[in-house]
């Protein structure tokens, strides 16, 4: 764990990665430092990717010492990396307080239709655990612990790039947690990921996925400058079916959700995506498919059908391939664009959707750490 010795105690200091340009400008101004120092520091952090302040050679010794006293750079420690180098890899990180989160790196040539693609996608977590209790999801099984800080979100990308030697060019907030329930840090991390002074990933290559927090969807539509994409985890096309598997639907039902989606559409250029996991006997009837098609049509959304991936400890399973294909056809009968994930493994949503809160002790007992 990264920390500073104060007396005989080690205390963790915040990461500088979460400050952003404005935060850094303000911090420097308070200390009477010249404004151009911000540009230099950001370049060390996001272009040269140094791992210590001592390497920031164009800064004065005094400024380096002051930075060193106030901040760490990367607050994440890589505990474990799973998966082959040229396939989907899961990264397990330890945070400064000992909690664990995961990111998934999905390499190129795994387009949703099996086509070649040069996408290098990183699926990031936004919270430790999740409070939304979707009945099919692994991430919420152990409940909610805390929000990730802005730095902890951004650092997932820096750590994965440093470890893998690869460049991420697509970020999806489909890891553990509900990103819109961590609104402030989400918005700040998007800004840093997108900014030319930051990581520099185009807005269209950043996707926020939500279980449907209607007020925050509207806020995101108003606040975010970048043309980011929005994905809705729908999973049910009527209130009755959706409420059964997603308790959030009792708070924001489909009417409220769609009102927010219309609001989004009026303000944003990017197309919406509906994620719809197919779970046998729960949400896979052709009635749901037809309703889903109509709903997608009403907001011009693209539908992604994802055969459910079994989660240990949960009873759900995916429908037969015939049922999946029939469902797809019924959605398409409304003349909407829809895809069905047919590949066996390594799929983005499957991999991301199965990030589970691991207990710190479990890791130590099994000797994995
Ligand atoms: N809370 C946000 C972000 C998590 S996204 C949201 O709900 O959108 C995780 C994605 O993986 C969602 O589309 C989710 O529905 C999907 N997912 C979760 N569990 C899954 C499983 N067992 N099989 C396939 N996809 C799953």
Image (cartoon, rainbow, N blue to C red):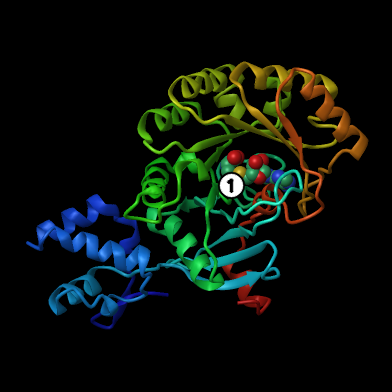
* Image height of 105 relative to 71, above or below: above
Q: Quadrant of ligand 1?
A: top right
The answer to which quarter of the image holds residue 256 is top right
In this view of the protein, can residue 5 be seen by the observer? no
* Rendering coords of residue 74 (x, y %): 39, 68
Question: Residue at the location (23% across, 50% down)?
Answer: 22
Question: Residue at the location (61% across, 32% down)?
Answer: 273
Q: Quadrant of the C terminus?
A: bottom right
Seen from the viewer's position, the closer of residues 32 and 69 is 32
Seen from the viewer's position, the closer of residues 296 and 203 is 203
Question: Residue at the location (43% across, 57% down)?
Answer: 154
Number of numbered discs visible in the structure rendering: 1
* Rendering coords of residue 107 (x, y %): 64, 59
The answer to which quarter of the image holds residue 301 is top right
* Rendering coords of residue 167 (x, y %): 52, 62
Q: Is residue 148 left or right of residue 89?
A: left
Question: Residue at the location (87% across, 38% down)?
Answer: 319
* Residue labelled 1 has its Cβ within 8 Å of some atom of ligand 1: yes
Q: According to the image, label 1 marks what residue? A: 174
In this view of the protein, can residue 268 be seen by the observer? yes
Mark 1 neighbour density, 10 Å: few (under 14) some (14–19) many (20 or more): many
* Image height of 24 relative to 284, above or below: below
* Image height of 291 relative to 8, above or below: above
The residue sitting at the bottom extreme is 8
* Image height of 336 relative to 339, above or below: above
Element under disc 1: loop
Q: Quadrant of the N terminus?
A: bottom left
The residue sitting at the left extreme is 32
Seen from the viewer's position, the closer of residues 271 and 64 is 271
Q: Is residue 303 left or right of residue 260?
A: right
């Amino acid at each position: 764990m990264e920390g500073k010795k104060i007396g005989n105690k080690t205390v963790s200091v915040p990461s500088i990665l979460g400050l952003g340009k404005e935060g850094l400008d303000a911090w420097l101004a308070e200390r009477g430092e010249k404004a151009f120092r911000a540009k230099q520091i950001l370049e060390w952090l996001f272009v040269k990717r140094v791992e210590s302040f001592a390497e920031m050679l164009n800064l004065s010794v005094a400024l380096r010492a002051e930075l060193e006293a106030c901040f760490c750079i990367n607050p994440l420690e890589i505990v474990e990396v799973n998966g082959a180098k040229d396939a989907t890899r899961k990264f397990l990180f330890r945070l400064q307080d000992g909690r664990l989160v995961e990111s998934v790196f999905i390499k190129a040539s795994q387009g949703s239709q099996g086509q070649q693609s040069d996408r290098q996608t990183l699926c990031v977590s936004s919270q430790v655990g999740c409070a939304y209790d979707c009945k099919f999801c692994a991430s919420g099984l152990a409940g909610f612990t805390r929000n990730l800080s802005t730095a902890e979100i951004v650092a997932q990308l820096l750590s994965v790039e440093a470890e893998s030697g690869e460049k991420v060019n697509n970020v999806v907030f489909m890891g553990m947690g509900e990103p819109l329930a961590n609104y402030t840090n989400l918005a700040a991390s998007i800004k840093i990921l997108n900014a030319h002074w930051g990581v520099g990933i185009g807005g269209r290559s950043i996707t926020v996925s939500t279980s449907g927090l209607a007020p925050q969807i509207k806020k995101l539509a108003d606040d975010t400058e970048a043309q980011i994409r929005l994905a809705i985890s729908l999973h049910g096309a009527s209130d009755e079916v959706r409420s059964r598997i997603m308790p959030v639907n009792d708070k924001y039902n489909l009417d409220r959700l769609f009102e927010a989606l219309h609001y989004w559409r009026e303000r944003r250029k990017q197309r919406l995506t509906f994620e719809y996991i197919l779970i046998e006997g729960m949400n896979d009837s052709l009635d749901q498919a037809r309703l889903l098609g109509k709903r997608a049509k009403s907001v011009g959304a693209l539908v992604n059908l994802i055969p459910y991936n079994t989660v240990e400890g949960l009873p759900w399973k995916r429908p037969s391939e015939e049922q999946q294909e029939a469902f797809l056809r019924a959605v398409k009968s409304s003349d909407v664009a829809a895809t069905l994930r047919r590949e066996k493994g390594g799929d983005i949503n499957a991999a991301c959707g199965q990030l589970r809160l691991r207990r710190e002790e479990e890791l130590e007992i099994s000797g994995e750490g």
